[in-house]
Amino acid sequence: MILSVDARPYTDQTLGTSGLRKPVPHIMQPHYVELFMQSVFDVVDVAGATLVLGGDGRFFNDRAIQTILKMAVANRVSHVVVGRGGLLSTPAASALIRARKAKAGIILSASHNPGGPDGDFGIKINAAHGGPIPVSVSDAIHQRSRTCDRYQILAGDDFSLAEEGRRHVEGCLVEVVDSVRDYVGLMETLFDFDRIGDLFRSGFTMRFDAMNAVTGPYATELFHRRLGLPEASLMNQVPKPDFGGLHPDPNPHHAAALVDMVAGRSEVDFGAASDGDGDRNLIVGRGLVVSPSDSLAVIAANARLVPGYRQGLAGVARSMPTSRALDRVAASLGIPAHVTPTGWKYFANLLEAGLITICGEESAGTGSDHVREKDGLWAVMMWLAILAERRLSVADILADHWRTYGRDYYQRLDFEEVDAGAAEELMDSLRRRLPTLAGTRAGAFEVVEAGDFAYTDPVDGSVATKQGVQIISGDARIIYRLSGTGTRGATLRVYLERFEPSAERHHLPTSEALAAVRDTAMAMAEVTRFTGRTTASVVS
Ligand code: G16
C-alpha cells in the first residue's frame, strides 16, 4: 500500500559541493530524509526510470536506504539497482549508473567526514552520465524542498539487502547486486593484472588502509584475491558504521598510522588509503607522502604506460586550487589543460564531452574517463601499474618527475569550525582589497595578479563566480576559499604553492620551502584577526 504523508517543509536542504550533508542528529529529524528525497524525485522526474542506490555504510545508511527504496517504489520508479548490504562506493555507483543506463544515482555518504551517531550523513545525487548533478539541478531541488510538504512511501516490511536477487514490488523491480564485481571488471579493462601481480611476486610490499570505510570489500577483492597482495597487508578493511572512530579522510593527519608505517619507518615500499566513500586517495612511499597535486601530475605523465591509456590523453584538468604541476605535464605532452572550480561536476562535463581523459584535485581526488567521479582505488591502481612498469621506488619516480618538470611545493592549511560570519568577513575583506593588491609587496612576495576565480563551462556555458581568491606572485601562489563540505561553522582553506625549478632545491621539507609564502598568506588575509587562530587545524 502506498501512503501519502503530510509534513512541514524544512528550509535548510541546500546542496553543497557534494549534495546534502548534515550532522546525523539533524538529518534524523522526523520526515527530513523523506521530504528531501521527494524533492529529488519530483525534480528528477523518476517515474518509469532506473535508479542506482547505495552508500558508504556509515551510521544511518541502513535506515535511509530502506526509506529511499520504499519512496522509489511509491514514486513509480521502474527499476532500482541497489548494492548488497546497501553498500556502493561512489566510483562503483558512477560505473553502475553508466552500465545500467540509469536516469540517476543516489549515494548515501558524507564522504571523508566522520560517521557515527554524532558524525555526519549525506545524500549525493548523480546524473545519468554518472557524475554529480549540475548546479542548476541542485538549485531546483533546494527550491522544491522549500515548499515540499507531502511525500509518497510504500507501507510495509523492509527489503532484504543481504543477498543478490530481484524482487518485483508494486510494478518496481528491486535488484540487489554485488557491490564489487562490476567495478573490478571495469578495472580489468584498464590494467594488466598480471603485470601488477608480478610486482607483488617480486617482493614489493604494500599496505592499504580502508579506514573502516567502504573500500574494504573492494580492496580485498582487487588487491588480495586478484593481485595476490597478502591479506595482512590490508588495514581496517571491514566497513563499520562509525568507521571505528577514525576520521576517514586519507590525508597524513588522519591516516597517520599508515603514514608512520610506510613513510616514517620505511619498512614498506608503498602505502595507500581511501576515504569514506572510496573516491579519494592517499599515496605514500618509503620516506615520503606524495602530495595529491604531484600524484595527479605523475599519473598524467606516465599514463601511456598503462593499457587503458596507451592511446594517449585527449586533455587534462585540475581544480583551480590544485598545483600547477599538471599544467607543466600537459604543456610537454602538447595537450590542453583545463582549470575548473572545485567540485567534480565541472570535470564530469569535460569528461562527457571527450575534452579530457584524466583530472584531479588537491583534495586527493583523481580520476579518468572510465567513470564520472573521482576514484580512489583507480588512483592506487595507476600508481601500482606505473611502479610495475618502471620498477623504481616512489621517491625515485617523484625525483625524476621533478627533475624533468621542476617541483611545485604545495601545502593546504585548514582552519576548521571557525565562526561562519568571521570567515565570510575575511573573504569579503580580501575581495574588497583585490583591485588594490596587484603591485603590492609583502616581503619577497610581489603580487602580480589578484582575482576571484570565475569559470565559464565550455560545455554547457554555465558561469560560476566567486570560486576562490587567487593571489599570484610569479612562481608562488596563495588561494583562499571556504569549504563547501563542512557541516559545523565554516572551514577556511588556505592553499600555498611555490615553483622550484632547480633540482638542488627539490628536497627541502615542504613547510620550510613554503615558510615565506605561508607568512605572507596569514598576514595578507589577516587570518588571526578574523578567526582568532594562529595555526591551522589540519595541514596537508
Ligand atoms: C567534494 C567534491 C570534490 C571537491 C571537494 C571539495 O568532495 O566532490 O570535487 O574537491 O568536495 O571539498 P571542500 O569544498 O571542502 O574543499 P567529496 O569527497 O566531499 O565528495
Image (cartoon, rainbow, N blue to C red):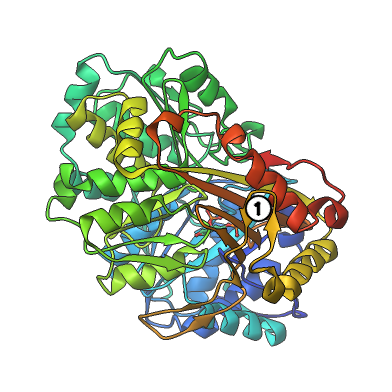
Picture coordinates of residue 24 (x, y %)? 71, 54
The answer to whether 225 is drawn above or below residue 113 in the figure is above
The answer to whether 181 is drawn above or below residue 41 in the figure is above
Q: Residue at x 52, y 29 (%)?
A: 508
Instruction: For mark 1, give the secondary structure.
Output: strand
Q: Residue at x 65, y 39 (%)?
A: 515
Of the pair 336 and 2, the residue shown nearer to us: 336
Quarter of the picture containing the N terminus is bottom right
Q: Which residue is mark 1?
A: 494
Q: Pointer 1: residues within 10 angstroms few (<14), some, or many (20+)?
A: many
Q: Is residue 64 left or right of residue 81?
A: right
Picture coordinates of residue 208 (x, y %)? 42, 28
- Can residue 454 be seen here? The reply is yes
Q: Is residue 427 left or right of residue 267?
A: right
Image quadrant in which you'd find residue 29: bottom right
Image quadrant in which you'd find residue 344: bottom left
The answer to whether 323 is drawn above or below residue 69 in the figure is above
Picture coordinates of residue 13 (x, y %)? 69, 73
Residue type, label 1 = Val
Of the pair 206 and 186, the residue shown nearer to us: 206
Q: Residue at x 60, y 46 (%)?
A: 412
Q: Is residue 158 left or right of residue 419?
A: left
Quarter of the picture containing the C terminus is top right
Ligand 1 rendered quadrant: bottom right
Q: Residue at x 34, y 71 (%)?
A: 350
Picture coordinates of residue 526 (x, y %)? 80, 56
- Can residue 51 be seen here? The reply is no
Image quadrant in which you'd find residue 31: bottom right
Of the pair 50 and 513, the residue shown nearer to us: 513
